[in-house]
Image (tube, helix red, strand yellow):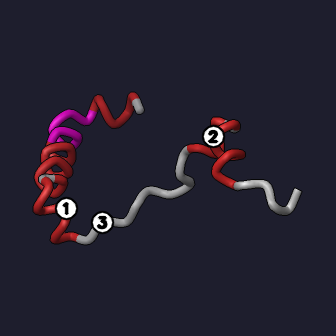
Amino acid sequence: MANTPKWNIRLRHEWLSTPLKKKRIKRGQKARIGLLDAEARKKAKAEKSPKAEQAS
């Protein structure tokens, strides 16, 4: 069993195929792909409608 390829097990078990943590992205990379702008829009939207915060 020790020589069993790990990728094969990950493919067979759905819960193992997903990564455990999100990949860390530096601030410069976020700015380049537009994630900083998206986070700012999401934050502004949450602040504007307090009803949405209570629902979640």
Residue nearest the observer in this picture, 51 or 6: 6
What span is colored magenta in the figure? 45-50
The secondary structure that dominates the magenta segment is helix
Find residue 11 and name its label.
2
Q: Earlier in the sequence, mark 2 or mark 3?
A: 2
The location of residue 26, given as percent across then percent down, is 26, 71
User: Residue, x 13% and y 45% (percent of image)?
Assistant: 41
Q: Earlier in the sequence, mark 1 or mark 2?
A: 2
User: What is the spatial separation of the Cα atoms under label 1 and label 2, in whole angstroms?
Assistant: 30 Å
The location of residue 52, given as percent across then percent down, is 30, 31
Comparing labels 1 and 2, the label whose residue is closer to the camera: 2
The secondary element bearing badge 1 is classed as: helix
Which kind of residue does numbered mark 3 sit on?
Ile
Mark 3: few, some, or many residues within 10 Å (few <14, many ≥20)?
A: few
Which kind of residue does numbered mark 2 sit on?
Leu
Which kind of residue does numbered mark 1 sit on?
Lys
Q: Which residue is mark 3?
A: 25
